[in-house]
Image: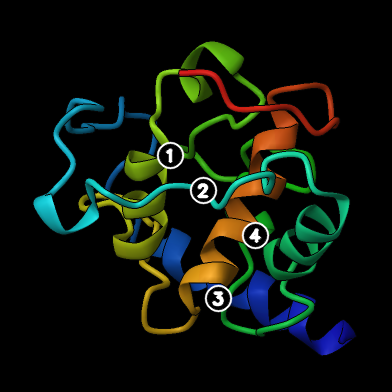
């Protein structure tokens, strides 16, 4: 498991070396502009606050389950960005603007013109939701909370 974290840091450094958004404002589509195939994606009932779901999401986020999925290498252990151009997941004003469909789409597809890769080929849908549930705690002081957008 320790190797997964090391691989994630190396992976993040490789991505950072070619980053095109360093110091720039991210260009994001409007929150309501979710592609049709993602518009009906919604967090399973109860998962925003389910401790087991959140713990599983934490393991994924930290790269303990899959070596190539290490969200913390860019977004930090507590949602504080580690790399320039990375969104601060502790920012409740930003997080609360995202619908769950929009958030799922971003994690699945990644963000064009940023270092964020998509994880839809590496993670099943339930795993993506687990990561999102864990990430959501950052904007609520590290505590589970229902998502309000």
Q: Tag 4, which secondary structure?
A: helix
Residue 60, image x and y in percent? 70, 69
Q: Nearer the viewer, residue 136 or 3?
A: 136
Mark 4 vs mark 3, CA separation in Å: 22 Å
Asked whether the beta carbons under mark 2 and mark 1 sit within 8 Å of each other, the answer is: yes
Q: Residue at x 62, y 76 (%)?
A: 10
Numbered disc in front, either 3 or 2: 2
Residue behind mark 4: 130
Numbered disc in front, either 4 or 2: 2
Q: Tag on residue 100?
A: 1
Residue 124, image x and y in percent? 49, 79
Q: Is residue 80 above or below residue 3?
A: above
Q: Earlier in the sequence, mark 3 or mark 1?
A: 3
Residue 101, image x and y in percent? 34, 43
Mark 3 vs mark 2, CA separation in Å: 29 Å
Q: Is residue 24 above or below residue 62?
A: above
Q: Residue at x 78, y 48 (%)?
A: 77
Q: Residue at x 40, y 52 (%)?
A: 104
How many C-alpha atoms fall within 10 Å of the one at disc 1: few (<14), some, or many (≥20)?
A: many
Mark 4 vs mark 1, CA separation in Å: 12 Å
Residue behind mark 3: 11
Q: Earlier in the sequence, mark 4 or mark 3?
A: 3
Q: Is residue 105 left or right of residue 91?
A: left
């Amino acid at each position: 498991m320790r190797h997964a974290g090391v691989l994630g840091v190396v992976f993040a450094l490789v991505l950072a070396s070619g980053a095109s958004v360093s110091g720039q404002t991210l260009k994001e589509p409007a929150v309501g502009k979710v592609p049709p195939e993602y518009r009906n994606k919604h967090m399973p009932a109860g998962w925003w606050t389910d401790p087991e779901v959140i713990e599983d999401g934490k393991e994924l986020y930290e790269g303990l389950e899959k070596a190539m999925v290490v969200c913390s290498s860019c977004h930090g252990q507590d949602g504080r960005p580690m790399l320039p151009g990375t969104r601060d997941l502790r920012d409740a004003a930003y997080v609360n603007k995202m619908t769950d469909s929009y958030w799922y789409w971003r994690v699945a597809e990644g963000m064009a013109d940023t270092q964020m890769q998509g994880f839809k080929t590496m993670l099943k849908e339930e795993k993506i939701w687990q990561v999102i549930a864990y990430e959501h705690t950052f904007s609520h002081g590290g505590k589970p909370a229902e998502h309000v957008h």
